[in-house]
Image (tube, rainbow, N blue to C red):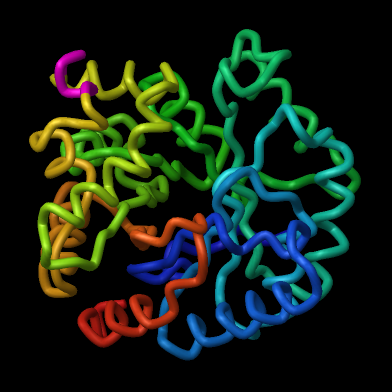
Amino acid sequence: MATVTHEAFGRVGIWSSALHGSRVDDPGRKAIAEAVAELEELGYGTVWIGGSPSPDDAADLVAATRTLTVATGILSIWGHAAEDVAARIAAIDASARGRFVLGLGVSHGPLVPQYAKPYSAMVAYLDALDAGAPPVEPGRRVLAALGPKMLKLAAGRALGAHPYLVTSEHTAEAREALGPQALLAPELSVVLDTDLDRARTTARNMLGMYLQLPNYTANLLRLGFSENDFEGGGSLRLLDALFAIGDADRVKARTQEYFDAGADHVALQVLTADDDGPGLPRAAWRELAAAFGDDL
């Protein structure tokens, strides 16, 4: 397996937890395939499968596209044996032609009964991937790194880092920790809505769950936020730091803040006010592609 170049990610990608073909029926899988094929045509560089995907989810998206980089964002190391992942990726790679990237993370203690010593567990998992037949080499994987230790590990044992739910200030700190060569591809949540009250409600509906997970709250506290910022689904200061809210031009400007802070690639997660959970906001993806134009 060859190293994936930074250029293969493009500048802007799409992150979505609605891209799990293994969790839907056949019409749903067809809708996902059509959506990612359109993302490719729109010019996005990478599609990130959110929400603890499996290698099979990635295989579906690889099959539906020709040039798009497909990444897991993020596969939980607790849910998939490294040996099985290495074997499955070897099969995927026959058709991926270097377009697949394995994003790995340690998930969260409240969600994983066997959660223990996450840093040591990640090191052991990477060791097992190195020993796979064939191995999943460092240049084909990224880590969901937030803190200094995991960022250092991402720089030394992976292509780089894919931090989730972070500010542009964190991106600047991550760039310093990673050094100039490692890939830095943060996620940025987007609410395309100029009604600020409604948009903030949408943002808080998403953020509330993450504010119950200590990995995220500890990172935000390190960045200078307080426990008071976590009340009521998130203070205005916290929302302004974590989300791009407004029209497409505002989203583009917020994305540029992450590039200015040192990001190589930004993965946009479009949130909607739908009550039925995450869907495929294809109209919003088109609107953003038009706004970014040649900057994708």
> Is 137 positioned to the left or the right of 108 in the image?
right
Q: Residue at x 30, y 45 (%)?
A: 180
Q: Nearer the viewer, residue 112 or 138?
A: 112
One can see residue 97 in this view: no
166 relative to 56, above or below: above
- Residue furthest out toward the front: 275
27 relative to 240, above or below: below
Image spot of residue 273 (x, y percent)? 34, 59
Q: Residue at x 23, y 34 (%)?
A: 170
Q: Quadrant of residue 215?
A: top left
Q: Main secondary structure of the magenta part?
A: helix
Q: Nearer the viewer, residue 274 or 166?
A: 274
Q: Residue at x 20, y 39 (%)?
A: 172
Image spot of residue 262 (x, y percent)? 22, 49
Q: Residue at x 88, y 42 (%)?
A: 84
Image spot of residue 208 (x, y percent)? 35, 33
> Is 93 positioned to the left or the right of 159 in the image?
right
Q: Quadrant of residue 121?
A: top right
> Is 33 positioned to the left or the right of 269 in the image?
right
Q: Nearer the viewer, residue 167 or 154?
A: 167
> Is 209 positioned to the left or the right of 60 in the image?
left
- Residue furthest out toward the bottom: 41
Image spot of residue 177 (x, y percent)? 31, 30
- Residue 280 is one of the magenta-drawn residues: no
- Residue furthest out toward the top: 117
One can see residue 256 in this view: yes
108 relative to 64, above or below: above
Q: Nearer the viewer, residue 273 or 172?
A: 273
- Specify the segment rendered in magenta: 226-231
